[in-house]
Image: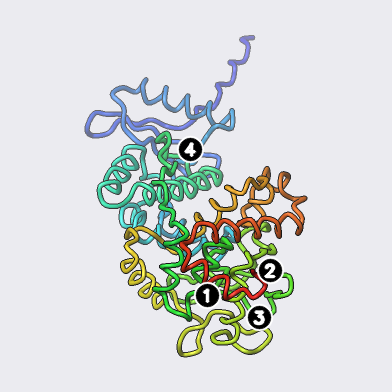
Amino acid sequence: MAGRKPQRRREFGTVRKLASGRWQARYIGPTGLRYTAPGTFDTKTDAQDWLNLTRADIEREHWHDPDAGAVNLEKYALRWLKERGLAPTTVDRYTGLLRLHILPAFGPADLDEITPPSVRTWRADRLQATGATTVAKSYRLLKAILQTAVDDDLLRTNPCRIKGAGKEEADERPTATIQQVFDLADAMGPRWRLMVLLGAFASLRPEELAELRRHSIDLDEGSLRITHASPELTNGKRATGDPKTRAGKRTVHLPDFLLPELRRHLQWFAEKERDGLLFIGEKGAPFRRSTFGRKWRKARTKVGMPDNFRFYDLRHTGNTLAADTGAKLKDLMVRAGQSSERAQLIYQHSTARHQRKLAKAIDAEVRGQLPPPRAAVLRLRHPGQR
């Protein structure tokens, strides 16, 4: 009796010859759906070889759904923003980068239509149109979004592969001299004078100054407590909350020459309630970035500062002065409200005594560098100074 013929292994997929004479390969994937090879083949053998490789990928669990990336980039990016749990200021910044730099090029495309060559072309075009720092931020955001798509199994690999493209190499920021800081304060006028001086000699950020209140001030101690920040978004609303990092919550001890300035501002301009804002506009409302910005640009021009000198750059003056006193790194980091995992271990033991010493050293340095007429005015404003 003849033996039974061995059962043939069921063929994976099908091949067929098209009217053009070329061969097409199709198969049922793990999803239960039918898939067609992305191209046609010269011979039946070529088509069958492709099917064999695809079957091997499925068996080794290396198979990737070829239709998974058919997701609109704009919809995916907006959902990505919503799901990150980002701070309002970060959402505001990312939304601007998407709207101005990423979506005009890739918004209509599906994820799997974004290729390494298209990313290179987009980046080159952006470098011609705007600054390198903005392009680096935009590239970094696009890469992060597409990396999440890889993690979601929507893409096999990330098409953002340009080495160093997300690295920012911003120009060194300008630093104002002590005399220039006082000249800027004078040019801004009495209402905004203290804001300029605190921005420089207390190293306070604009969003921290916006949320300073009467109860934040200890005149006997000569210090300010920074507990909140109020950055202004591009829509004009303020996102009041905790500082950006835990290190942002801090007590800043002031140089003595600032105390008379602070007392006068409290008497003349600050809101009168205990929790009243320290800085408000001429009409009694919280100051707006647009209004303040116009005054700042006029003052900057009057003093002769470069056009790229921002209010935020005042911090460089205070940080440089503090560093020149020979203070320890941990004290400098505390004063400026700077944070990183490594820095927290370095400066976590900084004491109020060190901070007061730092403030007095800045006071002495400022008085020593000012011309006699200006220094004499500071002595008059500080009754305890002989």
Label 2: state its secondary structure.
Answer: strand
In contact (CB < 8 Å): disc 3 and disc 2: no
Q: How far apart are marks 1 and 4 (CA)?
A: 40 Å
Dot in front, 3 or 1: 3
Q: Mark 4 points at which residue?
A: 156
Q: Which amino acid type corresponds to the residue marked 2 in the rendered image?
A: Ser
Q: Sort mark 4 into few (<14), some (14-19) or many (20+) by Cα contacts within 10 Å.
A: some
Q: Considering only order in the chain, which callout, 2 or 4, is on the residue closer to the N terminus?
A: 4
Q: Which residue lies furthest to the top in this view?
A: 1
Residue 193 screen position, x and y as percent: 48, 74
The answer to whether residue 240 is left or right of residue 12 is right
Q: Distance between the residues labelled 3 and 2?
A: 12 Å
Q: Considering only order in the chain, which callout, 4 or 3, is on the residue closer to the N terminus?
A: 4
Q: Mark 2 points at which residue?
A: 223
Per the rendering, the mark at residue 214 is 3
Q: Which amino acid type corresponds to the residue marked 1 in the rendered image?
A: Arg
Q: Considering only order in the chain, which callout, 2 or 3, is on the residue closer to the N terminus?
A: 3
Q: Sort mark 2 into few (<14), some (14-19) or many (20+) by Cα contacts within 10 Å.
A: many
Residue 335 screen position, x and y as percent: 64, 57
